[in-house]
Each structure stands twice: as structure tokens, then as C-alpha cells.
Image: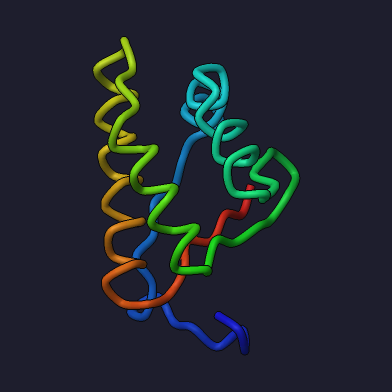
Amino acid sequence: MDFNEAGDHDLIQLVLSESQFYQLDAFGVFSDLNNMLGCLIDDFEDDAITNKQQLEEGLKYLKNVRLKDDRIQELMEEIICLFEEAVKRQTGVYFFF
């Protein structure tokens, strides 16, 4: 990612629809991560969480979030998996909206 040379086989991707993004945003997931980690996850913004401590803090937060919408909670589980993989592989989670 740092050299813009990552191929599709090098990435674990989760593509959110506009509706999914706004539903997660309405539950405050992105604003909570932004406030907690000092990042800027928002529509029309790109950001990354690459610091191990921040990834672990974000992961802990995400695991404790319980959303009332089962479909969005399932989506949250996929995001949790991305954070877990980033911690395990010592990489990062990148947001492009």
C-alpha cells in the first residue's frame, strides 16, 4: 500500500455500499473511531489506521459495539475481522470512501 503496488491478491477488502456506510455512520461507529484514534474516517476522505496500539484499541471498541440492526451487526463482524487480520499481519486498515 505504501508504494501503491498492492495487487488484489495482496489485500483483504470489504466494499461497503453507500447505504451501509451511512448506516454505520448513523450508529456513530466512524465518529467514535475518529474521536478515539485521532483519525478521519468520513465520506469523501481517505485515512488509515496502521499503528498497532490504535488497531488494538479500535478492535476492542468494535468488539464491544452491539448494533440493533442484525444486518449492520454482521457487517460490523466483517470489519472486526479486518482489524484482527491487520493486527495479526502487522499491517493496517485503510479507508477509501
Q: Quadrant of the N terminus?
A: bottom right
Picture colour scheme: rainbow
Residue pushed farthest top? 68
Residue 76 drawn at (x, y percent):
33, 35
Residue 71 drawn at (x, y percent):
28, 22
Residue 90 drawn at (x, y percent):
37, 77
The answer to whether residue 49 is above or below residue 39 is below
Total labels: the figure holds 0
Identity of the residue drawn at 64% across and 37% down = 35
The answer to whether residue 35 is above or below residue 70 is below
Give the image quarter of residue 70: top left
Task: Please name whichever residue, 68 or 39, is drawn nearer the observer in this view of the structure.
Answer: 39
Residue pushed farthest right? 44
- 32 relative to 45 in the view: left or right: left
The answer to whether residue 47 is above or below residue 58 is below
Residue 85 drawn at (x, y percent):
28, 65
Identity of the residue drawn at 42% across and 75% down = 91
- 19 relative to 56 in the view: left or right: right
Identity of the residue drawn at 39% across and 59% down = 13
